[in-house]
Amino acid sequence: MYQSIFTRMKRRQIFLQGIKDVLPLNIPVILFGIFYAVLCIELGFSAYFAIGTSLIIFAGGSQLIFITLLTAGAVPWVIFGSVIMNNSRNFLYGAVFSKYIEKKSSVWKVILSFFLTDQCFAVSNDYLKKNYKNKFAHYHMLGSGITVWVIWQLSNLIGVWLGDIVSDQLSLNFFVAITFLALIAKDLGKLDHFIIIIVSAICSLIFYNLPLKAYVIVAAIAGIYLAYLINTKFKKLIK
Amino acid sequence: MSIWTYTIIIGILTFLSRYIVTAFANTKTYSETTKKVLSYVPSAVFPSLIFPAIFYKQNNFEIYNTEVLAFIFALLAAYFSKNILITVICGLVSYVTIIFLI
């Protein structure tokens, strides 16, 4: 009896810790969420579409690629290919997380995977690394994941509501670019990452006018290939 | 293909990208090189989402415009702070300031 009350409290505590830890990372999520919904409306999509994509897809980057490429008239394989490329970092997150939740049930794995975002990864990875022996540690990930989900949906609602009154002067593309820049900010100062960033940037600018808007994939493949070269043939570049 | 068909397919692709490795990975079978190369994915993908949005306006390459100027401030903030929040705020503030000053 006492045992069960104790563990229930413990679970709740860890869940709340997850919420608390992820909150600061949500300011860009709110901005991004608002801009995503505004952009949807500006591009001529309905409010249902803006909110529906967020409920079903729940991945800001992929949703953004989806609507921009769709508006630009890209063919399906380019859209799906770009989304897969953009999501490929989730494989890495999954590779890290799998060792913390490998003993959990399939239902847990499905639920936790659904909420696996950049922000959730950033904070819960830290927590799980330190507390992996605690059998309720995954409640931290549940807390941080659900928090990001709720905030993402709410900021979309705000964006739908703001849709009409945002100034035409402001380029939404710019805000989106800044959000992605922020996500690689911590790597900018590392020489190996810097080289890859520059090469990917140059490729995307050179190949921007390729048919089918394939520049995202071309630049990403160039960057990944370069990362492979740096890690095999030019290890001196990495400290 | 309707936009909802796209949405559902992308929803499934996104979920699978989060689920497959999380649920089935045997991390011991990953080579060190694979792990390392995967860690560069954001650096390889994000620039292609950043730079064209800054330097292209209506399909024309522009090296001098409001966005480029504000982007330089954001870039400096990103480089020196290495912080998501500071980068976003600096980018927003410099962009809005430049728009209203010009």
Image: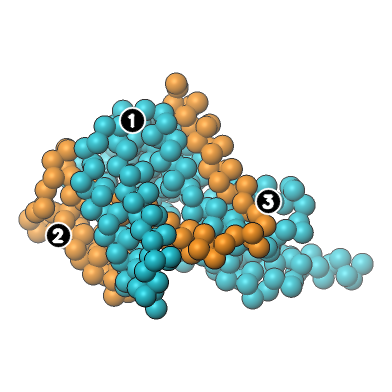
Chain colours: A cyan, B orange
Res B69 label? 2
Which of these two is toward me, A173 or A219? Answer: A219
Furthest-top residue in this view: B1
Res B24 label? 3
| Other-residue count near label 2 (Cα within 10 Å), few / some / many at <14 / 14–19 / ≥20 | some
Q: Do discs 3 and 2 share a chain?
A: yes
| Placement of the C terminus of chain A among the 4 image quadrants | bottom left
Furthest-right residue in this view: A1
Between tags 2 and 1, which lies in front?
Answer: 1
Q: Earlier in the sequence, mark 3 or mark 2?
A: 3
Is residue A145 visible in the rendered structure shown here? no
Q: CA gap, disc 1 to disc 3?
A: 33 Å
Q: What residue sits 72% from the left and 52% below the top?
A: A108
* Relative to B72, A87 lies left or right: right
Give the percent coordinates (x, y) of residue A78: 38, 34
Between tags 3 and 2, which lies in front?
Answer: 3
Q: Quadrant of residue A144?
A: bottom right
Q: Is residue A84 above or below residue B88?
A: above
The amino acid pointed to by label 1 is: Ala
* Relative to A100, A228 lies left or right: left
* Relative to A150, B90 lies left or right: left
Q: Secondary structure at mark 3?
A: helix
Q: What residue sits 74% from the left and 65% below the top?
A: A136
Which chain contains the residue that carries disc 3?
B
Which chain contains the residue that carries disc 1?
A
Q: Which residue, given by chain and number where applicable, does mark 1 sit on?
A: A74
Furthest-front residue in this view: A233
Q: What residue sits 74% from the left and 71% below the top?
A: A134
The amino acid pointed to by label 3 is: Phe
